[in-house]
């Protein structure tokens, strides 16, 4: 047999100990640091944790919104599938509309992506919601555009669009003008669905309890 560590609890313990040893998290509030730990764990890169840009109150705002029953609005099915539903405090609705016929029709109207169109379809659900963007830069751009014209405001935004076209610019637009949002994001090309869902999981319970399960 191949010798390797099999005990889940010990794997989690060592994983988080490694992240703490390699990343500098003392600039974050404790609840935001817990979120940063989860994000690093999700992607296997400790340096991601210290590269995050976050509002000091983002974890508290998101946790309060979920406790009050707010929905979680996702830009991609992979984000929605990564959320550990058993940890949600109020059986919160997880909404992803990117694959609906309505999103396809709206995308044609906008001459944009279905991800951007799905943001429009969130409608009144967006007010006080937790938003997790882990794929499409166009979704983040569209959210910011809608806020600029007075659209509903989420309680918290986890912004992790990824890729080579628009990811850098969309996150830069958020950081340079947060529009009063409580948010966390990872500047640059890196991002992804696992990071966005990790933020939701971090505020839904002990960040080291069943991490990655």
Image (cartoon, rainbow, N blue to C red):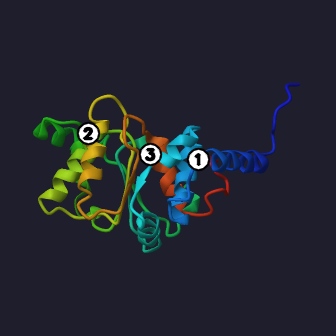
For mark 2, what is the residue?
A: 169
User: Which of 54 and 138 lies nearest the eye of the viewer?
Assistant: 54
Q: Are marks 1 and 2 in contact (CB under 8 Å)?
A: no
Label 1: few (<14), some or many (≥20) within 10 Å? some
Q: Residue furthest right?
A: 1
Q: Earlier in the sequence, mark 1 or mark 3?
A: 1
Q: Cα distance, mark 1 to mark 2?
A: 25 Å
- What SS does tag 3 mark? helix
Q: Which mark is residue 74?
A: none
Q: Are marks 1 and 3 in contact (CB under 8 Å)?
A: no
Label 3: few (<14), some or many (≥20) within 10 Å? many
User: What percent of the width, then of the height, locates residue 94?
Assistant: 42, 56
For mark 3, what is the residue?
A: 79
- What SS does tag 1 mark? loop
For mark 1, what is the residue?
A: 23
Which of discs 1 and 3 lies nearer the camera? The answer is 1
- Left or right, 211 with respect to 59, comes to right
Residue at screen point 54% across, 58% down: 33
- What SS does tag 2 mark? helix
Depicted 211 relative to depicted 4: above or below: below
Q: Earlier in the sequence, mark 3 or mark 2?
A: 3
Q: Quadrant of residue 62?
A: bottom left
User: Which of 15 and 132 lies nearest the eye of the viewer?
Assistant: 15
Q: Cα distance, mark 1 to mark 3?
A: 25 Å
Q: Cα distance, mark 3 to mark 2?
A: 21 Å
């Amino acid at each position: 047999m191949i010798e390797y560590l099999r005990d889940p609890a010990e794997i989690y313990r060592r994983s988080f100990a490694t992240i703490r040893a390699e990343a500098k998290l003392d600039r974050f509030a404790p609840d935001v640091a817990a979120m940063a730990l989860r994000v690093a764990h999700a992607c296997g890169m400790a340096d991601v944790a210290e590269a995050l840009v976050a509002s000091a109150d983002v974890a508290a705002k998101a946790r309060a919104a979920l406790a009050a029953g707010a929905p979680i609005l996702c830009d991609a099915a992979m984000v929605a599938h990564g959320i550990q539903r058993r940890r949600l405090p109020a059986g919160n609705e997880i909404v992803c509309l990117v694959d609906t016929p309505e999103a396809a029709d709206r995308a044609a109207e906008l001459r944009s992506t279905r991800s951007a169109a799905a943001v429009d379809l969130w409608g009144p659900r967006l007010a006080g919601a937790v938003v997790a963007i882990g794929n499409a830069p166009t979704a983040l751009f569209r959210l910011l555009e809608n806020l600029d014209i007075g659209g509903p405001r989420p309680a918290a935004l986890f912004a992790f669009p990824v890729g080579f076209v628009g990811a850098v610019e969309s996150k830069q637009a958020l950081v340079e003008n947060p529009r009063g949002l409580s948010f966390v994001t990872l500047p640059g090309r890196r991002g992804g669905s696992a990071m966005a869902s990790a933020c939701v999981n971090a505020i839904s319970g002990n960040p080291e309890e069943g991490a990655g399960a």
